[in-house]
Each structure stands twice: as structure tokens, then as C-alpha cells.
Image: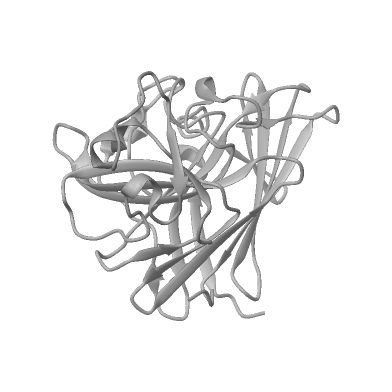
Amino acid sequence: MTVTLDIVTDLARGGRWTSLRTTATGREWLWRRAAPERDNVSPGDAFVDAGGLEECIPTVRGAPDHGDAWSRPWTREGVADVLHCDRFALARTVRATADGAVADYVLTADAGFRFVWAAHALLDLSDRAGLHIREGARTRLFPEAARQLDRAWPDGASWVEGDWPVPCGLRLDRFGPDDGTAVGAVIDASHCCVHDQTDRLSFALEADGQPVSVALWRNLGGYPAQHPYRSTGVEPMLGRVFDLAEAGPGDAARVPASGEVRWRLTLTPNCRCA
């Protein structure tokens, strides 16, 4: 079998993906930054952004910050990487395929447990990179985007909606050069493809009976307020909000009577979208 993607993870530090590389070209997709304080975090700490791909669950924003997984050690049990938390357990099995790689997940918890999960992938992209998602996909924008829209932000609204790729007058399918802005969005789609010059990387998410989406974090030097830096995230997601506390009906994944939720993330370096 031809291995087209090479993935490296760090179980001791939250199960984080530290490398995602196209083997044919040597292209490293994951962005990283020096964050030595990451080595000493405890559950409940404020998020320490070291880049890579973080497993964010049961929320992204809100509490706990970026979820429970990133600040806890994982273990290897057979072929699976496993995280045990107070209210749930998560098993992840990553394997190479002829076309790329597949990550299979199983969450076990009490029936009715609600959660958001995101493969919080911060990508090392040039200012000519773009994100391809089906045109017209419903897109939620969050308050940090308010000043960039073609309309006033509604009083008290947690988000507003528009159509991809230009929801509410804000074009989101190009990353572009640093301009001092930072925008988070959640797009109603199960598949996306990143183009960066001649390189391609696609993400596809499958989860029967659960809400699937693609989250976008386009930070072009606008975050954090003190010492901002560039970070660009493309994040397959279960759920339709960053903060579980803001999830309405259908906005979060829910554990059925079986006590299990299963999903699959497929990564491919040879997507053929236009």
C-alpha cells in the first residue's frame, strides 16, 4: 500500500497531532509555535496554543477552554489512543490508507450526553491559500466578525447566518495576507478541501445521526489582543457552535441509548475540487 500521508501524535500532551505530512512532496500541513508552558498544564487551565491538531471535546470555546482532551494525557490500548474523563471516554484509531489516512472515533458516555467535538487543525498556509466548500452552504459567523459585515450585529445574538463563500458580505474562502482581523465561522458541510498553490488537503467527516460541519478560524494577526500572531484553522466538527453552552436543538452531538457515538474523519492529499 502506498502511504500518502504521515501522521505523528503526542499522547502525553493531549493526544495532539504534531505532524501531518504529504509523503510524496514532504509538505508539512500543521502549523506550530513555541509554547513551553504546554508541558505543565492541568485540566481546567486556559488553553495553551502550541499549534498542530488538537482534539477539542466536549466544547471548543467556553468551559473548559478548548475542552477536556488537550490538557490530559492519553494512553495506548491495543491499536487505539484512549482518553478517560469524568463523564466520557474517547477512543481514536488512526490508520494509513492508499488514498491518505482515516481516523475512527468512539465516544462512550451516558445516554443523552451532549458534546461538541472538533479536529482543531491549525494549518501552515500561505496568503494565497483558499478553502473550497460547496457554494451556498449555510455559514454561522460569531461576534468577532461584527465589524466586517455588511449589516449591524443584532442585539444579543450569539451568531448570524449567511451563505458560503461570502456570508453577510464577508468573503471567507481566501486566507490572504495578515490584516489584523480574526474570524470564526461554522459551515454546514461535511467535506472541504484546502488549496495552497499546487498542494491539496481534503477533510471529510461521517457521523450517522449527528450534526456535522466545518469550523473555520481565520486569524490574520488579529488575535490575541496582546502579541497577536497568524493562525489559520480548518476544523471538521460534530456540532454547529463553538461553545456547547450556546447549543440549541440540533447544534450538538448527543449520545443515543446505546451509549456510543462513532464517527470517521478521512484525510486525502489528492482532492480534485475546482
Relative vertical location of residue 76 with respect to residue 135 in this rendering, above or below? above
Q: Residue lying farthest front?
A: 151
Count of marks overlaid on the render: 0
Residue 47 located left or right of residue 84: left
Relative vertical location of residue 244 with respect to residue 188 in this rendering, above or below? above
Q: Residue lying farthest right?
A: 258
**Residue at left 36%, top 65%?**
130
Quadrant of res 99: bottom right
Horizontal and vertical percent position of residue 12 = 48, 39
The N terminus lies in quadrant:
bottom right
Horizontal and vertical percent position of residue 95 = 65, 61
Relative vertical location of residue 270 with respect to residue 126 in this rendering, above or below? below
Residue closer to the observer: 3 or 244: 244
**Residue at left 36%, top 25%?**
154
Residue closer to the observer: 255 or 96: 255
Q: How is the image coloured?
A: one colour
Residue closer to the observer: 145 or 205: 145
Relative vertical location of residue 122 with respect to residue 210 in this rendering, above or below? below
Horizontal and vertical percent position of residue 120 = 46, 45
Residue 85 located left or right of residue 270: right
Horizontal and vertical percent position of residue 193 = 49, 65
**Residue at left 28%, top 34%?**
146
Residue 9 located left or right of residue 47: right
Quadrant of res 27: bottom left
**Residue at left 85%, top 31%?**
258
